[in-house]
Amino acid sequence: MKEHDRYSVHFLGLVALWLAMLGVACATDTAPDVVLHGQLQGSDNHTYREVPFQVPAGVNRITVQFEYSGRDEHTTVDLGLEGPEGFHGQQGLRGWTGGSKQLFTVGAVDATPSFAPGPIPAGRWSLLLGIPNIRPSSKADFTAKIWFGHPGDPAWLPTVLNPPLHKGPGWYRGDLHMHGAHSDGSCPTQSGDARAPCPLVFTVEDAARRGLDFIALSDHNTVSQANDIRELQPYYDRLLLIPAREITTFQGHANLFGTTEPLDFRLGSATVPDWNTLLTRAAALHGVLSINHPIRPNDETCMGCGWTPEKPVDMHLVQAIEVVNGMDALSPTYSGIPFWQEQLSKGFHLTAIGGSDNHNAKVPLPMPGGSTAIGLPTTVVHASDLSMKAVLDAIREGHVFVDVQGSRDRLFDMTAQQGHQSAGMGDALGAPAGSVVHVTLHASAMNGAHVEAIVDGKTYSPKNDLAIQGAAQALTFDWPSDGKRHWIRANVRGADNALWVVGNPIYIN
């Protein structure tokens, strides 16, 4: 992953800033809610021992990190979890991991393998310790750190469960839209004689094979896939799995990333009368929300697919637009770019992203009229590290470009400078009337293509040549400011004028 110096000026709309502040407040790696200490002795050999703790009301997740000494003397401690007696099966047993895991979580919708997800009632819980071996003369000290989760917490908490897969800033490549067995994704069965719901592991394995850094599993109106993610993520330690859902309504679709909390999607019902109600509730979950494939039919051919809200929508509650869905950038009829640029010209700061909308993980290549291959297009973000929070923050802040053709190596960046100020994609720059904004574009692995500069939705033709004539090249042009509000962005097109890259804007004044 290639790194560039990043931006010194960051700007967000008022509501986006509010959401980001909430995310930062929620994502602080806090101390455990409970810390338990104890000691085992030789007399504990071949016994079970309960270590009780109290769970308060309003908790929907218990995360445990367990450590003990004495391994050099072959002391072994197995681990389980008990809830209130009679609540969940055999005397409240919620799971038994033996000695295979020292860190686990049990939540309302997902749990570490070996444990059962489900409600977390208040009351007396216990760690269940099994001691298959401790020598008669040995002693072992143990410490259990316990974190409690609460409704509304983002999916990256507690951070002890979700450390960065790669530390340090860089460009990270991903696919933000796909479906598997938890909604309508299907693929050929083992025999090949039929189709069946496609297991999530096929999607994840294909994304890893294609060299992606992150994917969002966005099944329709459900987060049941979060339990599968909990199983798969430890093995896929170079591919970040982001829980998401496609909110599918009769008036449009939207992806909500970074939360596994319940959300009523029944738009038009008494409980969810309009999009503003739904979006306001989604905002409280601290995720990132994108409008999907906005320029799609909304009829029998694709019921609800197009963005057709019956009442005006407060676009401050939206953070992103899926401007490229599968191969629709090749179609002027279905491309989401004009819809996105219309919102930019209204003053909304919305990040352009892309997603394959894959429904068949076994598709090796894009198929006309069928499912698009995973990673086509690719959303490329410049994030502080490869973690769920960092990737979603980068999307929220607009530090993103869309690799329309899903390459493995194309990189694009744009910065603007006026005086001592500088800004990058997604950021803001002040430029008084009469000043000149100096724009620099970095392009890699796009030899033979050319940059298309766009100001306020219209092609801008600078004096400088914007042809890319090398493996890595910096291009520049100047733009005169009139002191008013504008936005500047750029595309990259191949020699045949096919769209290769969609860049996000820099906001002027």
Image (cartoon, grey):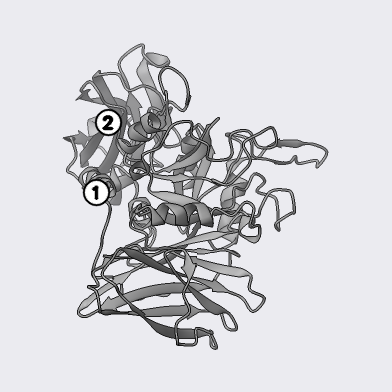
Q: Is residue 447 left or right of residue 302?
A: left
Q: Mark 1 sits on what residue? A: 14
Residue 439 image position (x, y, % from top left): 36, 79
Q: Residue drawn at (55%, 79%), measured in percent from left and top?
A: 450
Quarter holding residue 30: top left
Residue flagged by tag 1: what amino acid is it? Answer: Leu
Which callout, 1 or 2, points at the residue further toward the start of the chain?
Answer: 1
The quarter in which the N terminus is drawn is bottom left
Vertical placement of residue 468 versus 89, above or below:
below
Q: Which of these two is toward me, 423 or 95?
A: 423
Q: Is residue 86 left or right of residue 126?
A: right
Q: CA distance from mark 1 to mark 2?
A: 26 Å
Q: Mark 2 sits on what residue? A: 150
Q: Secondary structure at mark 1?
A: helix
Residue 16 image position (x, y, % from top left): 29, 48
The quarter in which the C terminus is drawn is bottom left
Q: Secondary structure at mark 2?
A: loop
Residue 259 circle label:
none
Q: Which of these two is toward me, 150 or 10?
A: 10
Instruction: Residue 126: tell me if it is visible.
Output: yes
